[in-house]
Amino acid sequence: MMDAQELAQKIDHTNVGRDATWNDIEKLCDEAELYGFRNVCVTPTQTARASKFLENSSVGVCTVIGFPFGVQTLYSKAFEVKDAIDNGANELDMVLNVGALHSGDDNLVYRDIRGVVLAAGGKVVKVIFETGLLSSQEKVRACHIAQRAGAHYVKTSTGIGTTGATVEDVKLMRQNIKPEMKIKAAGGIRDLETALAMIEAGASRIGTSSGVQIMEGLSRV
């Protein structure tokens, strides 16, 4: 069993709800500082405020790009990245263009991801697949495209899609990316047992709105 600090550093404590208030985000940031989470993950609107709140903290700020459907143009996503960085984001979770992948337009999918990677200027980029919408073959193709485009992570889900993370999907992703590339499991991870199962399957990061519950679960073990 990993210790509390090690587990906390694998968690992106998340609130990307469209109805999230500043009070909600301040609470998220307070909890992230208290438990020592790796990042908070918030919407673009909340990024500057979260960054300001956490400016003297070791907790980073992650925001979402092309959220939640991934259908923005290449230019729009790249602009979102630059705006997010200006507002203090140090990690970017971008949504894959699922329609383009379904259409077999792997070149567009590549250019979409590559544009975000270049705009990020070396900051961590994670590509959200929304695995519940993809076949196994599409998940494998998406892994290969994201890797070729220079993304740092592949990520299972937005958390608002049809399904969340599964152990099977994490294992499939791990088998189809190079060892130095990482996986973020997100969507429906609400307890310690599920979080540990995702890590065991190959996830390096957990995206969850239930970070506190997961840490409290560890304290009871």
Image (spheres, rainbow, N blue to C red):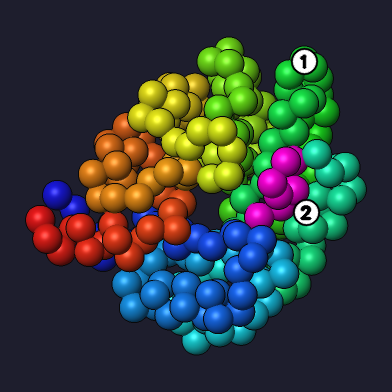
Residue under label 2: 119
Image quadrant where one finds the C terminus: bottom left
For mark 1, does the 10 Å Cα neighbourhood hold few (<14), some (14 to 19), or many (20 or more) residues? few
User: Which residues lie in the magenta part?
Assistant: 64-70
Label number found at residue 104: 1
Horizontal relation, residue 157 to residue 46: left or right: left
At x 44% / y 26%, what residue is drawn? 169
Horizontal relation, residue 209 to residue 149: left or right: left
Mark 1 and 2 residues: CB-CB less than 8 Å, in contact?
A: no
Query: Residue 147: which quarter of the image?
Result: top right
At x 59% / y 38%, what residue is drawn? 161
At x 56% / y 33%, what residue is drawn? 162
Horizontal and vertical percent position of residue 88: 66, 73
Q: Is residue 139 above or below residue 22?
A: above
- Residue 170 among magenta residues: no
Give the SS element for disc 2.
helix
- Amino acid of disc 1: Gly
Query: Magenta part mainly helix, strand or loop?
Result: loop
Horizontal relation, residue 70 to residue 221: left or right: right
Q: Earlier in the sequence, mark 1 or mark 2?
A: 1
Horizontal and vertical percent position of residue 55: 55, 84
Compare residues 186 and 91 and report the one nearer the observer.
Answer: 186
Query: Residue 153: which quarter of the image?
Result: top right
Label number found at residue 68: none
Horizontal and vertical percent position of residue 182: 47, 40
